Image (cartoon, rainbow, N blue to C red):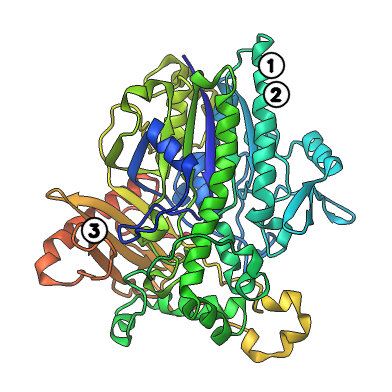
Amino acid sequence: MAANVVLIITDQDRARPSYERVALRCPARERLRASGLSFEQHRIASAACVPSRASMFTGHSPWVHGVTQTDGLAKGHDDPAMRWLSPTQLPTLGHCLRALDYDAAYLGKWHLSAADLRDGQGTVATVRREGRRGVRAPAGEARYREANPLSAFGFDGWIGPEPHGAAMHNSGTIRDPLYAEQAVEWLRERGRRFEGGERKPFFLAVNFVNPHDIVFWPEWSVFRPRWLGSGVPSSPPPPTAGLGVKELLREPPVRNQYRDRYLRAYGPPDLIRSAYELRGEAYRRFYHALIERVDRHIAAVLDALDAQPFAEQTAVIWTADHGELLGAHDMHQKWFNAFEETVRVPFVVRAPQLRARAGQRVEERSSHLDLLPTILGLAGAGKGTAARARLETQLDERFPKARPWPGQDLLAERAELDSYFVTADAIVNGNQRLAAVTRRAPALRRLSMLHYTPIDGCATGVEALVGSVEGRPYKLCQTFDPRGTVLDTLALNPRQRFPGERELFDLEADPAEARNLAGQSATAQIEAALVRRLGAARAAVGGPKAGEVALLD
């Protein structure tokens, strides 16, 4: 029987690093883990927000869907470098579920296309801020319901605008309670329809913002300390914080440039740096407070679901679009790297057929490319079923150029594959060359310290493979030039402007990824084997084969 599915997505929410011991009060997360199956080695397919969500909802890598950039800092939503997902390009999860006769609803953060409604006064508002709480605007919500902006992607019910940008009403602190409220209303209405005899299966995506509010740390730590939360235990800095000159010289140049440009993109670099370095403990407390904050909203959704008559026929999946470095490797947020703090995220499935496995942990690798096939399996359209055959026939007619999904149904029999990740998201490269602080204080634009230049003169793309060699987990990372490069070679050639850099980490002996083993004779055979496997994994998700020119910008 096809199950209902509730998909809960949090934003910038990493899996707990091995070195982190802070005890958080997150009963909703623990409730899901206790009643579901936890995939401990789950990694994203791309970063940051927009590319990752495109992979989650299409089941494809950026090599196929072409969505590589996130708006923000240097880019607005209409920047020439932005490539939003097109509803006619590839089938989305919404298209699939609609073809399977599901009601597919979408609430909360979207960030896959420029879907906000606009009129003569600007963006149509659906929320206003009163102090530290948001108040819904029914007239604006009605306009979104009538327009149904995500219908072309197969989803109904989305109420914008996007919770994106520096305005307080776009923060998760303001918007997440309202998203939870919308989800509770939706589930209760669905319960009333169920009691009235309706049995059509449904899919509900509930997309929260937090702990994404950590991006506001430089501003909130100074101007809005009351918004930071309190009562969260302290945690020590990550073991890879405080890199010395020797370590920095061994880093790929793109990361050193990012460390500089990231500070300049916010404001006076010395001031922004001090907000992170001098108040590091408070910074980490704030991130963990945001995790506790969004957990309360997850709990509200679970409570509403479990009170409905269809609860026993409903699967719940919780995951995140990407993680957060939180000062690891002397970096913040999620760009220009493939470290575990960025790429490994929670993935928990609670489903009717998993009751006998409740509370278990799965250590086999999985990927965000597995999300769509797993949901199709829950919907009764797993690989090899008649429903899947009918679905693929319908999709082939509408999307004749679409490729097969490379991911696997995580609840069916599967082979453990290597995890492949790629990103070319250059958040500090775009039309905007002024620090974010100048948008609130235009008079500061005359200060030269608040102007910055894009990252240039180095390879800016990053790809990575996580796989086992003789039962031991390793990660191979390499940078490449997304504007045209011959992959699987680190030497300059006429079609490659910048050489790449390679890193190799033994994730068992060095889970913090502090020791780069690339180029060492003792691990040369392992490195060579993983380079070959990385090329095969890239090709398997639709990327270029070894020796082919790659364009991913």
Circles 1, 3 touching at the beta carbon (< 8 Å): no
Q: Which residue is mark 1?
A: 193
Q: Viewer-proximal residue, 374 or 552?
A: 374
Tell which tag, 1 or 3, sits nearer the viewer.
1
* Left-right relation of 442 to 505: right
Tell me if I can see residue 549 in this picture: no
Residue 282 x, y percent position in the rendering: 51, 70
Nearer the observer: mark 2 or 3; the answer is: 2
Query: Helix, strand, or loop for circle 1?
Result: helix
Image disc number at residue 507: 3
The answer to whether 171 appears left or right of 42 in the picture is right
Position above or below: 394 against 199: below
Q: Closer to the camera, 274 or 89?
A: 274
Say which amino acid is labelled 1.
Arg
List the residue tagged with mark 2: 189
User: What numbered label is drawn on residue 363?
Assistant: none
Q: Earlier in the sequence, mark 1 or mark 3?
A: 1
Q: Position of residue 232 (x, y in %)?
A: 49, 60
Helix, strand or loop for disc 3: loop
